[in-house]
């Protein structure tokens, strides 16, 4: 335990146990001088704080801890010896005050037991529920940092394309990831949805992101890329039921875009020239589900102003009060009505419309790719 935290703990403990010596004054029928009560309480409180610091810093079973305990009892014994030599107030010691003395002893006993037992309960709580709470909180903070690393906002562009992406996890550690990679004049992006939430899903997301980024740096067809990713993820997950749906684009100069999907929602293609929206879909298994699954990829042509939309089912499946899902149709309407806006504005309008439709129940991730070639 860091020394500043240890000092705060020792201070709280000394204040709690100071009441024991004050209660002892009641038990002794208030016979000792006021100054002695204060001095004795201050000495005992400081001694307890020092012994607590020594014990926690050295370990409960060390010889130093044993020596600290011996010192505490030696000082208590010395204080008792000194008390016997002090002039005592005998007013409440006379026979007529016997009922008062009995009441003072009863109150003093409870005043001694209450803080002592309270301290014991506090220590037990700190060692069990407190540690559990801190561990849980630490895991949540780690999950949140993982989420920020694995699903950061995207804002990437080159001479021919611009990409804007955003993810809104349903908890501190969601299962969605998104990324964009530029290499040799091409711009690639992908979106994934890992089954599950929490640290385990976060670790799997990290594996997917690293493997996908490495694979996208190689000039291989997306079909082979998915096959390689699938094999790697299947072997790494070691029998767990985890898998990931995946959608990927590789955008090259000249308006040629290769795409591939693995168990994922269709990619929406907004055509600027005809003001229409079509769907790019593939019936393929998610990644990591079967070891020898096969995959294919396709190619589509884009023109200046065209927008390709990748999204996860957390957006499409948001229900309203009538249990009606948001669906692809509403996304297409937003694209048709706002295609001329910036991708950041379009992203915000989609998330706003989804939020108005119903309450978020799953991670929501959206990536927009616009052709900007003249």
Image (tube, grey):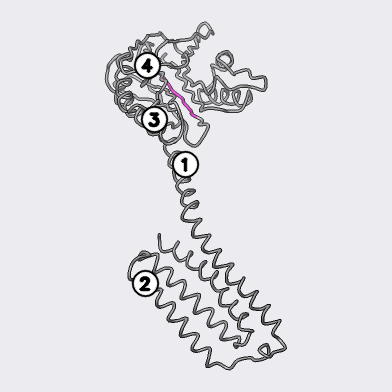
Residues packed near mark 4 inside 10 Å, few (<14), some (14 to 19) or many (20 plus): many
Q: CA distance from mark 3 to mark 4?
A: 23 Å
Q: Residue 295, how many percent across, how many down?
A: 34, 12
- Mark 4, secondary structure of its residue: strand
Q: Which residues are magenta?
A: 161-167
Query: Nearer the N terminus, badge 4 or badge 1?
Result: 1
Q: Residue 178, how many percent across, how many down?
A: 42, 26
- Mark 1, secondary structure of its residue: helix
Judged by its main secondary structure, the magenta piece is strand
Q: Which mark is residue 140?
A: 1
Q: Which residue is identified by label 3?
A: 205
Q: Which residue is identified by label 4?
A: 251
- Mark 2, secondary structure of its residue: helix
Query: Nearer the N terminus, badge 2 or badge 1?
Result: 2
In this rendering, position of residue 345 left or right of residue 226:
right
Q: CA distance from mark 1 to mark 3?
A: 16 Å
Query: Nearer the N terminus, badge 3 or badge 2?
Result: 2
Q: Which residue is identified by label 2?
A: 66
User: Foreground mark, 2 or 1?
Assistant: 2
**Residue 352 among those drawn in magenta:** no
Q: CA distance from mark 3 to mark 2?
A: 50 Å
């Amino acid at each position: 335990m860091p020394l500043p935290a240890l000092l705060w703990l020792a201070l709280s403990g000394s204040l709690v146990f100071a009441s024991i010596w004050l209660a002892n004054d009641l038990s002794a029928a208030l016979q000792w001088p006021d100054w002695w009560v204060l001095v004795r309480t201050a000495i005992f409180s400081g001694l307890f704080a020092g012994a607590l610091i020594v014990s926690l810093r050295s370990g409960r079973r060390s010889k130093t801890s044993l020596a600290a305990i011996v010192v505490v009892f030696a000082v208590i014994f010395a204080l008792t010896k000194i008390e016997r030599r002090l002039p005592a107030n005998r007013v409440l010691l006379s026979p007529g005050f016997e009922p008062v003395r009995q009441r003072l002893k009863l109150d003093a006993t409870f005043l001694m037991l209450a803080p002592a037992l309270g301290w014991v309960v506090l220590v037990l709580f700190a060692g069990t529920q407190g540690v559990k709470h801190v561990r849980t909180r630490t895991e949540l903070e780690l999950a949140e940092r993982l989420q920020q690393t694995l699903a950061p906002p995207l804002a990437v562009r080159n001479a021919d394309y611009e990409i804007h992406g955003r993810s809104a996890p349903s908890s501190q550690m969601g299962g969605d990831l998104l990324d964009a990679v530029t290499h040799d004049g091409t711009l690639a992006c992908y979106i994934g949805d890992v089954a599950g939430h929490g640290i385990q899903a976060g670790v799997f997301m990290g594996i997917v992101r690293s493997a996908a980024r490495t694979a996208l740096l190689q000039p291989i067809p997306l079909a082979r890329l998915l096959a390689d990713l699938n094999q790697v993820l299947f072997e790494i997950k070691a029998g767990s039921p985890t898998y990931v749906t995946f959608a990927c684009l590789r955008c090259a100069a000249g308006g040629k875009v290769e795409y591939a999907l693995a168990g994922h929602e269709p990619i929406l293609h907004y055509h600027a020239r005809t003001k229409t929206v079509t769907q790019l879909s593939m019936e393929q298994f998610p990644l990591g589900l079967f070891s020898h699954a096969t995959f294919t990829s396709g190619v589509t042509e884009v023109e200046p102003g065209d927008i390709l939309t990748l999204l996860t089912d957390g957006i499409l499946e948001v229900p309203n009060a009538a249990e009606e899902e948001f669906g692809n149709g509403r996304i297409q309407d937003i694209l048709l009505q706002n295609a001329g806006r910036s991708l950041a504005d379009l992203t915000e309008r989609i998330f706003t419309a989804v939020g108005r439709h119903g309450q978020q129940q799953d991670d929501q991730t959206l990536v927009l790719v616009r052709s900007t070639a003249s």
